[in-house]
Amino acid sequence: MTNWEIVPKIIIWAFILVVFIWDVIANSSGHHEATVSYVLLTTSQKHPVVAFLFGLLAGHAFWPNK
């Protein structure tokens, strides 16, 4: 496996871990409005294109490449 394959995996897993830790800390300290899910929900209610773009990104990320 080359660096071109390893680096994106490390970045993605690090991002997921940081977001998870942030959500746990924010939620357990009583700041529910600071969680990522709350921010995404309120933002997508004001701007529905956000939900569409996340769907587009998910489709791009999980569509088979082979």
Image (cartoon, rainbow, N blue to C red):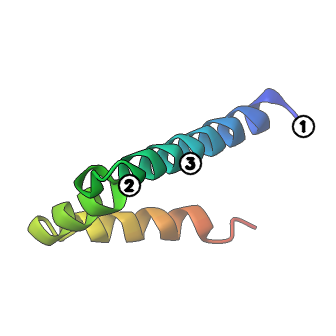
Q: Secondary structure at mark 2?
A: helix
* Chain-order first, disc 1 or disc 2: 1
Q: Mark 2 — residue?
A: 27
The answer to which quarter of the image holds residue 44 is bottom left
Mark 1 crowdedness (10 Å alpha carbons): few <14, some 14-19, many ≥20: few
Q: Is residue 65 above or below residue 3?
A: below
Q: Amino acid at mark 2?
A: Asn
Q: Secondary structure at mark 1?
A: loop
The answer to whether marks 3 and 2 mark residues whose Cβ atoms lie closer than 8 Å is no
Tell me the CA gap for discs 3 and 1. 22 Å
Q: Secondary structure at mark 3?
A: helix
Nearer to us of marks 3 and 1 is 3
Q: Mark 3 — residue?
A: 16
What residue sits 76% from the left and 67% below the top?
66
Tell me the CA gap for discs 1 and 2. 38 Å
The answer to whether marks 1 and 2 mark residues whose Cβ atoms lie closer than 8 Å is no
What residue sits 61% from the left and 44% below the top?
12
* Chain-order first, disc 3 or disc 1: 1
Image location (x, y in percent) of residue 7: 70, 32
Q: Mark 1 — residue?
A: 1
Q: Amino acid at mark 1?
A: Met
* Chain-order first, disc 3 or disc 2: 3
Tell me the CA gap for discs 3 and 2. 16 Å
Image location (x, y in percent) of residue 2: 85, 31
Give the residue at the far top of this rendering.
3
Q: Amino acid at mark 3?
A: Ile
The answer to which quarter of the image holds residue 41 is bottom left
The answer to which quarter of the image holds residue 8 is top right
Nearer to me, 40 or 24 = 24
Lateral position of residue 43 relative to residue 55, left or right: left
What residue sits 29% from the left and 69% below the top?
51
